Image (cartoon, rainbow, N blue to C red):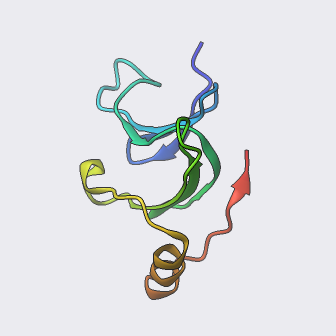
């Protein structure tokens, strides 16, 4: 049973631990694909154009911030620190509020 959440444009939130956001390449295998944001996704939000998220690395517990422009290739996604994340949110006028999982 697939209980992932469709975030649009082939992105899916995987709810099972460790929570992650994937890019679903094939419609044949819903809920599987390469990670766009590595585990553990602690908070996320999305709309038609954007996905924003915070994750905590499983190994070193480092916190990273993410902004995904859903119109671009998932391979171009890079983690941000909190300052760069805040600046990009303002610069791109992204009106989303992170929600805890």
Residue lying furthest right: 100
Residue at 36% from the left image edge and 33% from the top image edge? 24
Residue in the image at 38% along x and 48% along y? 9
| Labels in figure, total | 0
Drawn side of residue 44 relative to residue 59, left or right: right
Quadrant in the picture for the N terminus: top right
Can you see residue 33?
A: yes
Give residue 91's position: percent from left, percent from top. Answer: 44, 87
Residue 6 spot, x, y in % from top left = 53, 39
Who is closer to the viewer here, 61 or 56? 61
The reply, left or right, for residue 42 in relation to residue 50 is right
From this viewpoint, which residue is outermost toward the front? 60
Q: Quadrant for residue 32, please give it.
A: top left
**Residue 59 placed where, x, y %?**
53, 36
Front position in the image: 17 or 3: 17
Question: Residue drawn 49% across and 68% down?
Answer: 81
């Amino acid at each position: 049973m697939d209980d992932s959440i469709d975030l649009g444009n082939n992105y899916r939130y995987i709810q099972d631990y460790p929570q992650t956001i994937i890019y679903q390449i094939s419609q044949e295998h819903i809920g599987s694909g390469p990670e766009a944001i590595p585990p553990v996704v602690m908070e996320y939000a999305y709309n038609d154009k954007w996905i924003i998220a915070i994750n905590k690395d499983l190994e070193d517990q480092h916190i990273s911030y993410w902004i995904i422009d859903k119109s671009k290739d998932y391979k171009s996604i890079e983690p941000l620190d909190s300052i760069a994340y805040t600046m990009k949110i303002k610069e791109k006028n992204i009106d989303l509020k992170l929600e805890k999982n």
